[in-house]
């Protein structure tokens, strides 16, 4: 009744009922910490590598005139052809036409040099002259275009060899009574290459750059194949949601505006294939033919390396022109362009342990066939094809297994039409009947 019998008040607890602090985590050793970090890295790789394999995208080149010729007209179409965007679209085609014209002109004159002018100078194809110089004299394939055995001290470029032969022939004309003495004491040497292996390496480097352009062409065709055949908007504005953070703050331009590759009408696909893809492939094949011939006909090491680098400049001319003469608006739009998502295989919901196990299994030694350098094999294969084309069209094989030049004929004239440069197999250059040079059968 007095309130102390438990009827009116709760008993005062005798112990602290507040939550007890969690026990401190036991310190881990340095070895355990390293194992945790390694597991974290393995999990990241197990998520990343399969995700990249599941993702397939396609996009035009964003730093090339070929890419801008595809994207800019679609931007203008999406906006209803406003004058400024229409002008940017027309300029993209104009710049592409200028680029193609410059590249074809340079390759035309390179082809004319080797098909017309060098023949009037009396030059034969280099083929494998001098390739076996380390085994000479006395070895197979040591006979040079002058009919004598090639040796290292007697090996010259064509210009030097021609000059030395001119001096010797001039001495014979001036002193006809001393012909035998001149033949015995005046040695013009032989024409041949300085390094067979350096020539192969330079051809490989050149084809490496060619293969990059080839794959970009294939990706462009792949893009035209996969995007829908309907007019879709390539540029869109995303309005921020009411009450969102973007409504009260300046929204970044790259978030408010999206430039994305999507559907285009069939007529535009046809136009892009005719005016963008086919010229790109055509220029690629012309560059490959002229460039390989140019390198295979270069005899000295220094010129080989310089020429290989110079030819890659021709391949990159479209990118140089894009960075130099296009407008800032065009370059900015191209930088914003998002690739077209062809497909993305869905990833099953898995625990971390399952992801780790599956990812490590896909990257194990049993599946390393997936990591074979397919593109490197493509470069090697294309190099072999182009070299075979050179040897087949310009050289013949001797009984010793080496390759020497075919019989050489003077061209019928100095005229060299564009059809012969572009399609030499269908429009061969007219030549005179009698050969000005044939491979000697024995020493003079």
Image (cartoon, grey):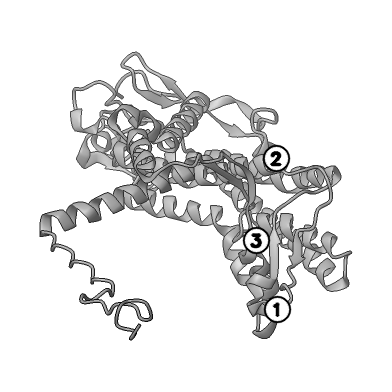
For marks 1 and 3, give the CA distance: 29 Å
Seen at 20% across and 41% down, the residue is 153
Q: Residues within 10 Å of mark 1 (few under 14, many from 20)?
A: few
**Residue annotated with mark 3:** 337
Residue 35 horizontal side relative to residue 370, left or right: left
Mark 1 touches mark 2? (CB < 8 Å):
no
Q: Secondary structure at mark 3?
A: strand
Q: Secondary structure at mark 1?
A: loop
- x, y percentage for residue 338? 63, 58
Q: Is residue 330 or residue 206 the one in the foreground?
A: 330
Q: Is residue 108 or residue 227 the one in the foreground?
A: 227
Classify 338 as above or below 346. below
Q: Residues within 10 Å of mark 3 (few under 14, many from 20)?
A: some
Q: Is residue 424 or residue 429 the one in the foreground?
A: 424
**Residue annotated with mark 2:** 226
Nearest-to-viewer mark from 1 and 3:
1
Seen at 61% across and 71% down, the residue is 324
Can residue 340 be seen in this snapshot? yes
- x, y percentage for residue 47? 41, 47
Residue 207 horizontal side relative to residue 67, left or right: left
Can residue 327 be seen in this snapshot? no
The mark found on residue 243 in the picture is 1
Seen at 28% across and 72% down, the residue is 19
Seen at 48% across and 29% down, the residue is 385
The mark found on residue 147 in the picture is none
């Amino acid at each position: 009744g007095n309130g102390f019998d438990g009827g009116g008040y709760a008993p005062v607890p005798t112990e602290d009922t507040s939550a007890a602090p969690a026990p401190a985590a036991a310190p881990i050793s340095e070895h355990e910490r390293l194992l945790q970090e390694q597991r974290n890295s393995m999990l990241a790789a197990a998520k990343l590598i399969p995700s990249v394999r599941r993702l397939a995208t396609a996009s035009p080149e964003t730093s090339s005139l070929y890419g801008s010729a595809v994207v800019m007209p679609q931007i203008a179409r999406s906006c209803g052809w406003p004058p400024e965007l229409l002008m940017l679209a027309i300029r993209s085609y104009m710049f592409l036409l200028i680029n193609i014209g410059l590249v074809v002109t340079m390759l035309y004159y390179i082809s004319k040099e080797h098909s017309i002018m060098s023949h009037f100078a009396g030059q034969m194809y280099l083929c494998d002259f001098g390739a076996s110089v380390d085994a000479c004299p006395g070895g197979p394939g040591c006979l040079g275009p002058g009919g004598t055995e090639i040796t290292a001290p007697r090996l010259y470029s064509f210009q030097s060899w021609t000059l030395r032969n001119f001096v010797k022939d001039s001495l014979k004309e001036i002193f006809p009574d001393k012909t035998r003495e001149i033949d015995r004491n005046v040695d013009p040497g032989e024409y041949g290459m300085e390094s067979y292996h350096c020539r192969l390496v330079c051809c490989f480097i050149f084809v490496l750059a060619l293969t990059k352009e080839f794959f970009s062409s294939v990706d462009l065709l792949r893009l035209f194949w996969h995007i829908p055949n309907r007019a879709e908007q390539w540029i869109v504005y995303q309005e921020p949601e009411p009450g969102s953070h973007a409504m009260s703050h300046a929204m970044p331009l790259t978030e408010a505006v999206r430039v994305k590759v999507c559907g285009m009408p069939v007529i535009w696909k046809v136009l892009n294939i005719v005016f963008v893809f086919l010229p790109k492939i055509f220029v690629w094949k012309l560059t490959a033919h002229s460039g390989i011939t140019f390198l295979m006909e270069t005899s000295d090491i220094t010129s080989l390396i310089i020429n290989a680098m110079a030819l890659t400049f021709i391949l990159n001319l479209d990118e140089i022109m894009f960075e130099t003469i296009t407008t800032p608006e065009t370059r900015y739009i191209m930088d914003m362009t998002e690739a077209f998502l062809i497909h993305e295989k869905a990833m099953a919901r898995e625990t971390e342990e399952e992801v780790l196990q599956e990812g490590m299994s896909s990257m194990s030694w049993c599946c390393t066939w997936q990591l074979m350098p397919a593109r490197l094999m493509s470069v090697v294969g294309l190099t072999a094809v182009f070299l075979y084309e050179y040897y087949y069209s310009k050289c013949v094989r001797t009984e010793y297994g080496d390759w020497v030049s075919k019989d050489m004929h003077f061209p019928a004239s100095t005229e060299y039409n564009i059809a012969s440069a572009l399609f030499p197999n269908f429009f061969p250059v007219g030549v005179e009947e009698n050969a000005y040079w044939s491979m000697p059968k024995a020493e003079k």
